Image (tube, helix red, strand yellow):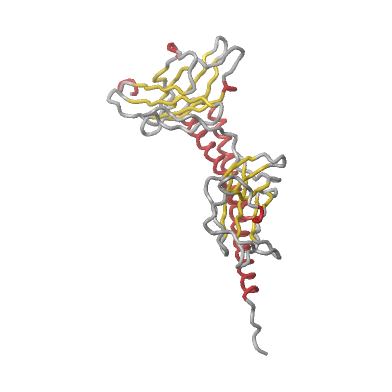
Amino acid sequence: MGKRQFTEEEILGKIDASFDSVEKLRGEGLDRVKLFHSIKHRALEKEQKRLSGKLGSDHPRVVKMAARIRYNKSMFKELNVEIEKAKISVPSLKENSWMVHGRVLDKDKKGVSGLTVGLFDEKGSWVKKLGYGCTDKRGYFSIIYPRNGEERKEVPESMELFLYVSDKDYKILFKDSEPLFVKIGQIDYREIYLTDEEICPPPEPGEEIIPVEPDAWIVKGRVTDEEGRGIGGLAASLYDKDRIFEDRLGTTLTDDAGKFMFVYKTEEFSEFFEANPDIYLKVLDQKGKKLYSSRKKVRCKAGCIESFNIKIKRTTRR
């Protein structure tokens, strides 16, 4: 008997199945990586709690551990995105079709289900003949044109198309600014992040651009020696001075250039009749020795963005 000849469609089907298997293995591998780092992360949290009780939360070792813990949490979010992506089974595409697919994620990088994704022209009108997609529990959607069994209606390749995301009440949650083009035989992928951020006013000329979330307050600055050289590795702590209690708004380490920055929300300092915080700073060395404090010169009714330039004498740091 002669060997059976496989059709082109059967061969492509086997290739698609192979890719799905590889993605499944990738997802399993990422799951193991996440488990390993989760164990290390829990141990680090316990050690940070122990050292905080022994040395104080302002101590540079404790601050450094806290920074590592924050980094780990951010890394876990990215890992979760990749793990969920690997679990998705991508629809097969015929050679006479075009597809755009992807995921809709919230600000915590978790998939959002039950949303409608459509393609709109540059005038903001829905291009109905291209259809639409709905997000599943992982936030995944796909739009295939034309769908199986449907007649293909010509769409110019030069026509700019934009992804819109809306909820069940037809409220537009997202408008993409990067255009898509229908190219038969091609697959496009997009990840869409939904945020509650509003457009902020431009900075004044010469001011450093800092991305700010809504209801955020910023304190930035630099610690230098008497020759203007930045001092890194110092623990800077920010406080809101009240009549009875003082709220610590954050602690961070200065970078190699001596720079530091705090971002905090109104809820962290707001009290009855207090619209603006009264702030001051402390700077400690790696041994926990206080090098600087502005407690006697509290910056009352601080603005949304405040800057500090702190100079420390070389002899002070010895």
In the picture, measured across the screen, residue 237 lies left or right of residue 130, that is: left
Q: Relative to 140, is 240 on the left or the right?
A: left
Q: Residue at x 57, y 64 (%)?
A: 185
| Residue positioned most to the bottom | 1
Task: Check the image and report above or below for 192 versus 29.
Answer: above
Nearest the camera: 149 or 68?
Answer: 149
The reply to whether residue 31 is in sight is no
Q: Residue at x 55, y 9 (%)?
A: 243
Name the residue at the top extreme.
Answer: 243
Residue 101 rendering spot, x and y as whole percentages: 61, 54
Expressed as whole percent of the image width and height from the top left, the position of residue 135 reads 68, 49
The image quarter containing residue 113 is top right
Q: Is residue 59 above or below residue 2?
A: above
Compared to residue 38, the image places residue 207 above or below, namely: above
Q: Which of 288 and 167 is in front in this view?
A: 167
Q: Decide if residue 16 is in sight here.
A: yes
Quarter holding the N terminus is bottom right
Q: Quadrant for residue 168, please give it.
A: top right
In the image, residue 198 sits, relative to residue 155, either above or below, namely above
- Quadrant in which the C terminus is drawn: top left
Give the x, y percent position of residue 161. Answer: 57, 51
**Residue 165 figure quarter:** top right
x, y (%) of residue 273? Answer: 59, 12
